[in-house]
Image (cartoon, rainbow, N blue to C red):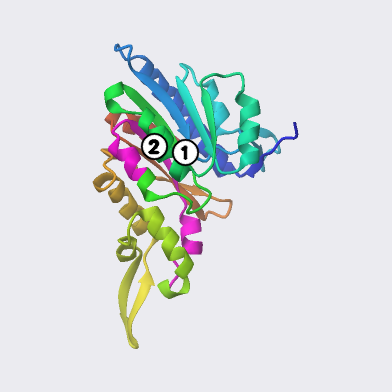
Amino acid sequence: MELIFDEINVWSEIKLDIIRKYATAYSKIISSKRNPSFTHIYIDAFAGSGIHLSKRTREFVLGSPLNALLVDPPFKEIYLIDLNGDKTQQLQEFTRHDPRVKIYSGDCNVILLKEIFSKVKYEDYKRGLCLLDPYGLDLNWEVIKQAGSLKTIDMFLNFPVMAINRNALWRNTELAPSGIGRMTSFWGDESWRNIAYKTVPTLFGDWEEKTRNEDIVNGFCERLKSVAGFNYVADPLPMRNSKGAIVYYLFFASQQKIADDIVKDIFNKYK
């Protein structure tokens, strides 16, 4: 089989390390529950092909789905989604001997809501670790909100600030009409406008100016708590390229303080 892989930068390697470390700690905690009915699952909504090529070392790097297969104690069920059929076919080859794995080829915004989140019900003693790592603004708010409302999911989320600035948050909102709709779908409503832009008086009248990235990120943090219903949202980790520019922020949201404490400790090691 000819391998399909994405070339990844160092910040993606760091993200994979963070998720692997948390997944191991998370699995140990859930597996230690005295109630044998407790089970935990792994969900990867933008799973990719399972393997990457490091731009830094030119070596192959296991992707998050294959890392999840190696977590010990093991996840009881593993759900992997990708829109690219060639990538999901490769995942099928990599995982065909593991009965825990179920792979979906299609839009995660539909599949998560219709097929997977119903498998993580609180009353069924199910818990889940969900990775939402969109390639851009390809994630709908309803997915995030549903993950919070279940009260069973710990969530890593790529907040794609560089893609947001490129596609939606230009200096003047009139310049990015197509990106505005995508931003509204990602955010959930148009309240992002009040956070992303401020009115500045000038000699020539009022001017609408973009706020700082940090203001937008802080607004999204608050939204995860107040609207999606997560009890804890760790300060997101800025992931920077070689020039120091922030490519995205890695968010973590949970219902449990112990989860929040673990991720804060991991994040601090990478700051």
Q: Which residue is mark 1?
A: 270
In the image, residue 49 sits, relative to residue 34, either above or below, namely below
**Is 103 in front, or is 231?**
103
Q: Is residue 170 magenta?
A: yes
| Percent x, y of residue 1 | 75, 31
Amino acid at pointer 1: Tyr
In the image, residue 261 sits, relative to residue 184, either above or below, namely above
Furthest toward the front, the residue is: 114
Magenta segment boundaries in residue numbering:
144-171
Q: Which picture quadrant has residue 27?
A: top left
Residue pictured at 48% horizontal, 39% vertical: 45
Q: Is residue 61 visible?
A: no
Amino acid at pointer 2: Met
Residue pictured at 60% horizontal, 36% vertical: 88
| Percent x, y of residue 131 | 45, 37
Residue pictured at 57% horizontal, 55% vertical: 243
Quarter of the C terminus within the rendering:
top left
- Of labels 1 and 2, the one closer to you: 2
Sequence-wise first label, 1 or 2 = 2
**Is 116 in front, or is 15?**
116
Mark 1, secondary structure of its residue = helix
Q: Which mark is residue 41?
A: none
Q: Which residue is mark 2?
A: 155
Q: Which picture quadrant has residue 34?
A: top left
For this view, does 114 lie left or right of residue 64?
A: left
Residue pictured at 34% horizontal, 58% vertical: 215
Real-space Cα distance between discs 1 and 2? 19 Å
For this view, does 234 lie left or right of residue 87?
A: left
For disc 2, the neighbor class at 10 Å (few under 14, some 14 to 19, many from 20) is many
Q: Is residue 64 visible?
A: yes
| Percent x, y of residue 250 | 44, 44
| Percent x, y of residue 53 | 67, 38
